Image (tube, rainbow, N blue to C red):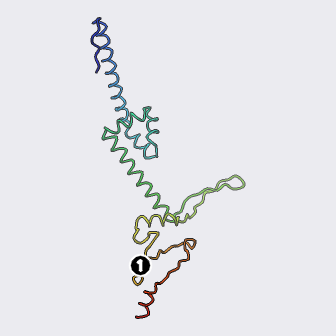
Amino acid sequence: MKEFKDFENEELMNELNEAVEQAVTKTQAAKGEITSLVLMNLPNIYEMAMNGATTSDICKALGIQVRTFNKIKSTNKQLQAVLKQAEIDMTDRVKQSLFHMTQARVVKAQKVLSNGSIIEYETLVQPDPSLIRYFLNNRDPENWKDKQEVTVTRREFVIDIVEDDSMVHDVEFTVSEEEKDTENNK
């Protein structure tokens, strides 16, 4: 803390030093209050993070600045753990949703009839083939990756297997005279 020295008026110097000390004490108390506010709201912070809130959203809800929140986060293990757990749980929730969308399922739906009445009914929702493919590409890449390479040992060509005809191009293979002679001599 900076102290005022070299004043001719010692009384004024003491008042200035006391004012500085009080300001520093208030600032430290305010920082402690903000940290306490954040720690008291850890369950709310977890819920907000689980629902996709950004750091900015969380700070607005708490009424604090992002810079202050990040400073507290950098030093407070409890806040770090809550945010990390929210990230893990949110990822698990998305994985679970993805898996459910790869399964056929019955859902309840509503329809408004021309007379204005509403009827409820059940309908079968088919699995999403692109999500099934995505799921298998990531869970079992050895068997489900998009590109497979097959090596032909005789001439050692690498052949790409493609599913889309638009990706196939005419390819010319030329055989050297030496290779022809080798083939003919066999």
Seen at 55% across and 74% down, the residue is: 169
- The kind of residue tagged 1 is Thr
Give how far across and how far down residue 157 sits, in percent: 44, 79
Seen at 43% across and 34% down, the residue is: 62
Give how far across and how far down residue 68 sits, in percent: 39, 33
In the rendered image, the vertical position of residue 63 relative to residue 96, given as above or below: above
* Relative depth, front residue between 159 and 120: 159
Residue hosting label 1: 151
Please give left or right for residue 142 compared with residue 130 in the image. Answer: left
Please give left or right for residue 80 compared with residue 57 in the image. Answer: left
- Total labels: the figure holds 1
Seen at 50% across and 81% down, the residue is: 173
Give how far across and how far down residue 107 sits, in percent: 54, 60
The answer to which image quadrant residue 28 occupies is: top left
* Relative depth, front residue between 121 and 86: 86
The answer to which image quadrant residue 70 occupies is: top left
| Crowdedness near tag 1: few (<14), some (14–19) or many (≥20) residues, C-alpha within 10 Å | few
